[in-house]
Image: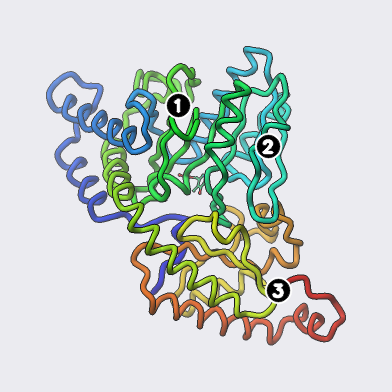
Amino acid sequence: MIYADNAATTKMSQAALNKMVSVANETYGNPSSLYTFGQKAKEALEEARADVAKVIGAEPKEILFTSGGSEADNQAIISAALLGKKAGKTHIISTAFEHHAVLHTLKKLEKEGFEVTLLDVHENGLVTPEEVEAAIKENTCLVTIMFANNEIGTIQPIREIGAVCRKKNVLFHTDAVQAVGHLPINVVNDNIDMLSASAHKFHGPKGVGFLYFKKGIRLSNLIEGGAQEKGKRAGTENVPGIAAMAEALKESAAKIEENTAKLTEKRDKLIKGLKEIEHSALNGDAVKRLPGNVNFCFEGIEGESLLLLLDDKGIAASSGSACTSGSLDPSHVLLAIGRVHDVAHGSLRLSIGEDITDEDVEYIIKSVKEVVTYLRGFSPVWRDLVAGKTQFILP
Ligand SMILES: *Cc1c(COP(=O)(O)O)cnc(C)c1O
């Protein structure tokens, strides 16, 4: 079996798993308790906070632990919106191809009277700092743009966008769930005010993540109750999960260079192999993309069938994102970069992990070629294209 869906979630690393078990076993006190059991748990929590902060160049007090990427996105955007509203600023800028945790939060704010500008994304899956600057108005309170896209893997010019926001005195949040642990990040150098991350995307456990918020930014109380996380998020902390997240992040961060070199080589082999399929196209910039991301459209086929047949061959991949698969709407990300409906339907995302081998790469290429040919064999859409009744869109 080849697991090529690491953008959906990753396997926990052995070190993270060991940490989770040992903390659950031995450090099970409540961090809010004053006796030694509690204080040991509190220490584990604060050690994790310091570790996480260090990896992204932040201070420990700038880290809020959350239940994952979605919560961090919600918390960042809603806090910035409320701060903006107090200052009479109710305009927010984002892009059309954000994760739904961002887009749906913005939809909710729109209903509450905020104005949202969603920037168009170029065909290469990028927005430019100039476009962000041009969209900023007097009453803009927040720019939220993802670091790397979860479907097509494109990496935005975050540092430059952050610089524009600094210049214009607008808060800048980035959903960096696909980037943390995979790309070098320093929130200070990269001009980031708020950043979301999720442990299960970098070999940590599911259900835990964090929000970096630059000191001075007043977050809202997301959950009312006790004084945990400075009252911003009440409830007894997920100490084993948080400790395991920190462990996974330290490990991933230490291996970024090595993993990038390895994954980039395998990714480019996959891209080269899949390009041999006629009437296909890579989605997103070939270079400014995550080392492990490959995303293709194949004309005349249907992504879901492709996935199921690849699964039969022992390959776990994705079409669109896990959140949209199961619905018949094509991916909003592929539509945002200008793919038409019919083409967007025939998409395949392979997000490879560090343990992939050359044999795996060869096997994936061979299998995708076989399955695409097989599916086109009885596709009425393909028949019409070949007969010249309809025009090919992809070369
Ligand atoms: C996975 C993902 C999320 C959601 O993270 P969860 O921890 O699953 O809530 C948000 N944004 C991006 C870009 C993602 O890839």
Instruction: Report the front residue among 161 and 19.
Output: 161
State how far apart marks 2 and 1 are (Cα).
25 Å
Residue 151: image tag: none
Return the residue at label 1.
213
Q: Quadrant of residue 375?
A: bottom right
Q: Quadrant of the N terminus?
A: bottom left
Badge 1 marks a residue whose secondary structure is strand
Q: Is residue 21 above or below residue 133?
A: below
Badge 2 marks a residue whose secondary structure is helix
**Closer to the N terminus: mark 3 or mark 2?**
2
Return the residue at label 2.
130
State how far apart marks 3 and 2 are (Cα).
34 Å
Return the residue at label 3.
299
Query: Which marked residue is nearer to the observer: mark 2 or mark 1?
Result: 2
> At which x and y percent is residue 234?
39, 24
Instruction: Report the front residue among 256 and 341.
Output: 256
> At which x and y percent is residue 185?
42, 40
Residue at 34% across, 66% down: 355
Relative side of 198 to 343, left or right: left
Q: Label 3 sits on what residue type?
A: Glu
- Using a 10 Å C-alpha cutoff, classify the residue at mark 1 as few (fewer than 14 neighbours), some (14 to 19) or many (20 or more): many
Farthest residue to the left: give it. Answer: 36
Indicate how the structure is coloured in the image.
rainbow
Q: Label 1 sits on what residue type?
A: Phe
> At which x and y percent is residue 260?
39, 57
Relative side of 209 to 248, left or right: right
**Closer to the N terminus: mark 2 or mark 1?**
2
**Closer to the N terminus: mark 3 or mark 1?**
1
